[in-house]
Amino acid sequence: MAPEQQQAVALHFVPELQATPSARVEAEFVSVGAYGSLDAFVVGPNGQRQRSNADDAGWDWITLKKAMTDEHGSWYSSTLTIEPDLSYEFTYNYTDDPSDKVEEGIVRDLWIQDAELYPRPWAEIPDWHPVKHEFTQDTWTAHLNATTATAATTGTPPTPTRPTPNTTTNTRTNDPHEHVSCPEQHRRPPTSLRPDPTGPQKR
């Protein structure tokens, strides 16, 4: 589950937590193709919510997505919760369309690009995905082969754009997992950003 990359994301939020005792972080990152959108809040002990300034966490979240990619592709969105004691937990959405979390929506070309960058077996592509509406299994396989050959020839795979903060009003409840598809195999047990006085943490 790429623990080093997960920790790199979480560390971006530590200064804000240290500045606000008893606060926690609730963050969600949407990553589709070359697009990324970060929606993150520092939540005070009385429930007051302040938008986080840790915008650069999006870059490390992209690195995390790449590190977690395997023959089943990668996720579309991810949540992070950091508690006041600096324990943290990630969840990952591999199956649901996160477009409702992005003000401007996610255009068709980004979905196609994401499926090219993080290919998965045909049976694991969700039925709502544009690939399933525009291709058959055979034509998609041919398209992927052609895309791979072009990238190998030109050496210019798509480059992610700078992740943008989501500035829409946050309407989520206090449940950090709401609207996120998170089977147990996609949820990492909580770990901590605090040093272990007994030595390196076991992972």
Image: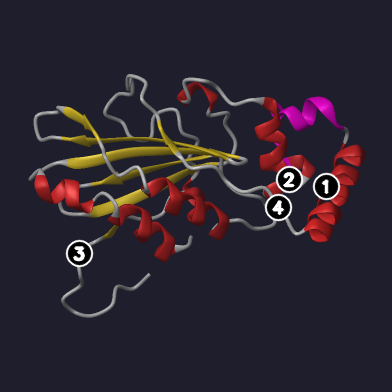
2 or 3: tag closer to the N-terminus: 2
Residue nearest the observer in this picture, 13 or 22 = 13
Give the answer, above or below, for where 10 lies relative to 94: below
Give the answer, above or below, for where 186 lies relative to 112: below
Give the answer, above or below, for where 202 lies relative to 43: below
**Circle 3: residue type:** Arg
Q: Secondary structure at mark 4?
A: loop
1 or 4: tag closer to the N-terminus: 1
**Residue found 50% across the figure and 21% down from its top:** 100
The 10 Å Cα crowd at callout 1, few under 14, some 14 to 19, many 20 or more, is: some
Provide residue 99's location: percent of width, then percent of height: 54, 25
Q: Is residue 87 magenta?
A: no
**Residue found 83% across the figure and 47% down from its top:** 144
Number of marks: 4
Please tell me whether mark 3 or mark 1 is closer to you in this view: 1
**Residue found 21% across the figure and 47% down from its top:** 83
Q: Is residue 9 left or right of residue 124?
A: left
* Label 3 with label 4: CB-CB less than 8 Å: no
**Circle 1: residue type:** Leu
User: Residue 176 sits in which quadrant?
Assistant: top left
Q: How far apart are the two marked residues, 2 and 4, measured between alpha carbons?
A: 10 Å
* Label 1 with label 2: CB-CB less than 8 Å: yes
**Circle 4: residue type:** Pro
Magenta stretch bounds: 124-135
1 or 2: tag closer to the N-terminus: 2
Provide residue 170's location: percent of width, then percent of height: 32, 22
The residue beneath circle 2 is: 116
The residue beneath circle 4 is: 157
The 10 Å Cα crowd at callout 4, few under 14, some 14 to 19, many 20 or more, is: few
Q: Which mark is residue 144?
A: 1
Q: How far apart are the two marked residues, 2 and 3, measured between alpha carbons?
A: 38 Å
